[in-house]
Amino acid sequence: MWWMIAFSFVVSAGTIPLIIMLCKKKGWYDTTDERKIHKGNIPRLGGVGIMLGFVSSTMIYFIASPSNKISHVLPIIIAGSIIFIAALLDDFFNFKAKIKLILQVAAAVIVICFDFRFKYIFDWELPLWFSYILSFFWIIGIINALNLIDGLDGLCGGISLLIIGSLGVIFFCAEAIDTRASAAVCFMMAAAILGFLVWNKPPAKIFMGDGGSQVMGFMIAVLPLFDSTPNFNYNKLLVMIVLVSIPALDTIAAMWRRTREHRSFMSPDSRHIHHKLIALGFTKVHTLIFLLSIQTCLCVATGLGMYLRKDKGSILLFVVFVFMVAFYSSIHFIYYTVTNNKPVDIKDLQNETSSKAKEATKSKGSKKAK
């Protein structure tokens, strides 16, 4: 397992420079809109490196290990590949929202049919029909939540790394053969993301694109649906609600905002959580550190929730989620008070990025001259 985790990182980190070269040669750059704060030509196919690292290491791990059945992970790889290819093509051809949604639905149905679903809420075994419906909307919702949060260098990748890494630790600590294989899948995915983040940390040399962010959302939605210990199954839904609370609350706020303003859910804007923090005076790097620090605290809280067991863990997780709702509401209130609901000026942020990049280039040039 550990060799394949290292292999996943090496493949991901090692292929990204080649992808950057190819994007520059072909002119495959990320577009700018009201949600993105970068300026200039930035390659956008980082998700390719993530998928290469994850799929190659996972297939080798399951084929080379007789105790692990490839069927354990094959539905996830097939459905994840559908999400990835569809989002990758969308990066080039700009599909209609309906087409993207249909392909997301197809991927969700595949994994649900292979019994990847929520089966319990606390001690209540869910009726089959309710389990299917809950799992379906969970998968579709998280795919799009991670896609929406991808507007700042390192943010989507950093949050995904922490969430999937936490799931890996939960499965690994269960100390059962089946959960050990699930832990390996999580760790190999986390290693692939880490390889990408080597090149995506501010200032980013490459973006993951929709092909990366939607796959991140899909994996975060599906990986916890592996069977696990009774303790994790008892609090699974609450654990995941806490872990994804940053992108989930941001998505709920975006949906409410766009409904109120009679705009399409798919229309971009500059009032996501990272935009609001920047409008309140945070730099982009400080915004990234701040949000990832909160995500780290959420991951630690879920670990404590697993340690406390069932009822006590449920209480802790519920309190943490209430805190997150209060935190997000506070940021929202302060933002509206300070800015009077004025959207962040994306052009100013883009110019700031451009000027910092020029200063960095001049600094490197002067050092070389010395």
Image (cartoon, rainbow, N blue to C red):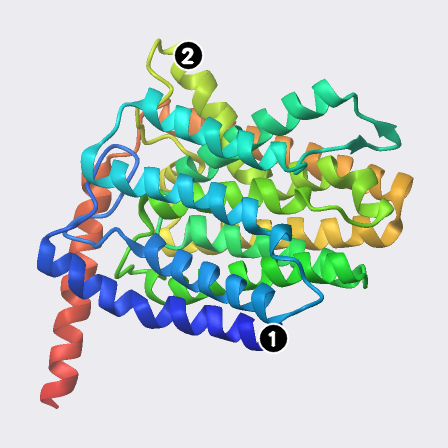
- Which residue lies most toward the bottom here? 370
Q: Position of residue 129 (x, y in %)?
A: 71, 18
| Left or right: 34, with 250 as reference point | left
Q: Where in the figure is residue 304, as x and y percent of width and height?
A: 79, 53
Residue at mark 2 = 259
Looking at the image, is mark 2 or mark 1 nearer the viewer? 1
Q: Residue at x 35, y 28 (%)?
A: 100
Q: Residue at x 88, y 42 (%)?
A: 310
Quadrant (top left, top right, bottom left, bottom right) of the N terminus: bottom right
In this view of the protein, which residue sits in the foreground, 200 or 72?
Answer: 72
Horizontal side of 316 relative to 26 (left or right) equals right
324 left or right of 177 in image: left
Q: Tag 2: residue type?
A: Thr
Q: What is the count of numbered marks?
A: 2
Query: Quarter holding the C terminus?
Result: bottom left
Residue drawn at point x = 45 percent, y = 64 percent: 56
Asked if 283 appears above or below 322 in the picture, the reply is: below
